[in-house]
Amino acid sequence: MATLKRPTAPHLQIYKWGPHMVLSILHRTTGVALGGGSLLLAWWLIALAAGPEAYEQFQFCMRTIAGKIVLLAFTLCLMLHLCNGIRHLFWDMGMGFEVEDTARSNILVFLGMVGLTALSWSIGYGLI
């Protein structure tokens, strides 16, 4: 049987890593993580409906260090997905495809994620 010599697609070692690649991968990853985080939201709503004992158990779990880390990760995922989704809306309108615009929007997505997460947690803890 003859072997065919077909061209292979470039792999990750060929491309130069940059913020655009990281954001593309993170957008997909945070989408999956938000799916898992919806289970956390469902647990909260079920505990709320089940009564004070179930809700206290949920609160106890979320007050631990591990619970706070999970909540922080969920918030970061939510805000990154939100900010990158807004950027995709502009792209859908045909705006922001220039290299300088993309580099600027990369930074804005990261800053928006950190800023909105900090704002959410500040409001949640009653600091604002």
Image (cartoon, helix red, strand yellow):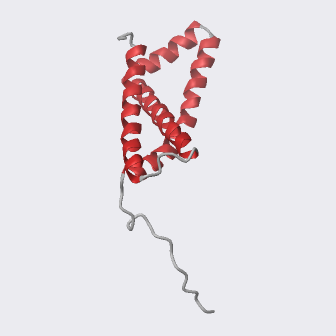
Q: Nearest the camera: 96 or 61?
A: 96
Residue that protrudes farthest toward the top in the picture: 52
Q: How many marks?
A: 0
Residue that protrudes farthest toward the bottom in the picture: 1
Point 45% across, 45% down: residue:
26
Task: Classify 50 as above or below 25.
Answer: above
Residue 126 is situated, as x and y percent measured from the top left of the image, at 39, 10
Camera sees residue 64: no
Residue 33 is situated, as x and y percent measured from the top left of the image, at 51, 38
Judged left or right of residue 17, residue 47 is: right
Camera sees residue 121: yes
Quarter of the N terminus within the rendering: bottom right
Judged left or right of residue 52, residue 15 is: left
Task: Classify 16 as above or below 60.
Answer: below
Residue 13 is situated, as x and y percent measured from the top left of the image, at 38, 66
Point 49% across, 32% down: residue:
78
Q: Nearest the camera: 80 or 70?
A: 80
Point 55% across, 27% down: residue:
40
Point 47% across, 51% down: residue:
97
Quadrant in the picture for residue 106: top left
Task: Classify 125 as above or below 12.
Answer: above
Quarter of the C terminus within the rendering: top left
Residue 64 is situated, as x and y percent measured from the top left of the image, at 39, 21
